[in-house]
Structure formats: structure tokens, C-alpha cells
Image (tube, rainbow, N blue to C red):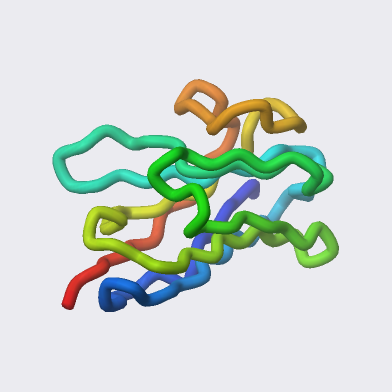
Amino acid sequence: QLQLVESGGGLVQPGGSLRLSCAASGFTLDRYAIGWFRQAPGKEREGVSCIGSSGGSTKYADSVKGRFTISRDNAKNTVYLQMNSLKPEDTAIYYCAAARFRLCVRVPRLDDVAYWGQGTQVTVSS
């Protein structure tokens, strides 16, 4: 069974950091670019970041550029999202997704996704 499982979410104070993980089972991630999306209450799901299948290409939404870093370890079949300098507006459910392409030329869109994870909650609040 193909599955993506996110972990690492939680409650953090503004200015804090979290590292999200996205682990795959049932398939190997190295054939896919992987994207991170987020969905805040009452808002549409939006692309946050993307990393190419080999890790050589990365893209970020302007809202997270300079604060978030995406990386991957294909040997562990896992992708990470390091989130620093978190703001209350970063509060959302974060989803990882396997894209239908290997190279990231932009932040992914919803129709780029082949497989979704179930999401992990990130709450930034004092």
C-alpha cells in the first residue's frame, strides 16, 4: 500500500522552530519530486515548497523563503521541512505530497500531486 506519513508537528511559540518529516512506505520517493503544502482554517490548501527527486532543485513560496528549508534523504525514503522563525500565520495543517514530475521548476499546485500524506498540525502561538 502506497503511503506518505508526516510527523513532527506540534505547538511552538512565535520565533521557534520545528522539523517536519515525510516518510514513504510501499514505494520509493526517489522517483518523485516531493512538495509540502499547508492549509489554514478557512483557507485553500497552498504549496509551500518543493524538492526534486535527486534533491538538486528546490522552490519556496515567498511567504516562507529564507525561513523554511526542504531536504531529502533518499536512503531513508524521507523528506524533511525545517521551519525556523515561525510566525502565527504559519499555523496550518501541513501535508507532504509526491508530485507527478521529478524536477521542481515552481512551487507545486494541487493538480501536480500523485499521492498525499494525511497531514500534521502546526500551531504557532504564545
Q: Is residue 30 left or right of residue 122?
A: right
Q: In this view, does 28 lie to the left or right of 41?
A: right
Q: Position of residue 39 (x, y in %)?
A: 30, 44
Report the residue at 74% width, 40% height from top.
57
Residue 53 lies in quadrant = top right
Report the residue at 17% width, 47% height from top.
41
Q: Position of residue 1 (x, y in %)?
A: 64, 49
Eyeballing the image, is 102 above or below 35?
above
Q: Nearer the viewer, residue 18 or 61?
A: 61
Residue furthest to the front: 66
Eyeballing the image, is 101 above or below 15?
above
Residue 60 lies in quadrant = top right
Residue 78 lies in quadrant = bottom right
What is the quadrant of the C terminus in the image?
Answer: bottom left
Q: Position of residue 97 (x, y in %)?
A: 55, 42
Report the residue at 23% width, 61% height from top.
88
